[in-house]
Image: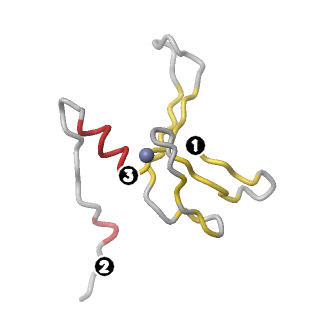
Amino acid sequence: MREYQKTEETLLAVTCNACGKTLRVENGMLLEEAIAVRHPFGYFSSMDGEIHSFDLCEDCYRKWISGFCIPVKIEENTELLVDTE
Ligand SMILES: [Zn+2]
């Protein structure tokens, strides 16, 4: 769950929907990891026309994916690596 200051689209707060933990936000910047999900359900869903969104803290994300029968695909994010040559 995210709250924004409407006039400037400034991020005010991020709360984990699963555990209710308030994540650190300073000057509109989220200073902790959060997994944001926003999904518009389509025609073949019983929730057609609804958009669901939520945020999870990293701990709740780990708990959630630990219950998957097929593990999440994990790739190295090479965009974060700095070329030192
Ligand atoms: Zn949480």
Q: Residue furthest left?
A: 70
Residue at x 24%, y 89% (from the top left corner): 85
Q: Is residue 74 left or right of residue 16?
A: left
Horizontal and vertical percent position of residue 29: 58, 65
Q: Earlier in the sequence, mark 2 or mark 1?
A: 1
SS type, badge 3:
helix
Query: Is residue 83 or residue 5 the one in the foreground?
Result: 5
Q: Residues within 10 Å of mark 3 (few under 14, many from 20)?
A: some
Residue type indicated by callout 2: Val
Residue 6 point in image, percent of width and height:
77, 51
Q: Nearer the viewer, mark 2 or mark 1?
A: 1
Question: What is the total number of numbered labels drawn onto the structure image?
Answer: 3
Separation (CA) of disc 2 from disc 3:
25 Å
Q: 74 or 16: nearer the eye?
A: 16
Q: Residue at x 65, y 69 (%)?
A: 27
Which residue lies under the disc numbered 3? 58
Q: Residue furthest bottom?
A: 85
Say whether mark 3 is within 8 Å of ligand 1.
Answer: yes
| Type of amino acid under label 3 | Glu
The CA span between labels 1 and 3 is 14 Å
Q: Verify CB contact (< 8 Å) between mark 2 and mark 3.
A: no
Q: Which residue is mark 1?
A: 1
**Who's the residue at 23% across and 32% down the image?**
68
Q: Secondary structure at mark 1?
A: loop
Does the Cβ of the disc 1 residue fall within 8 Å of ligand 1?
no
What crowding class fits label 2: few (fewer than 14 Cα within 10 Å), some (14-19), or many (20 or more)?
Answer: few
Residue behind mark 2: 82
From this view, report whether residue 41 is shown above or below residue 2: above
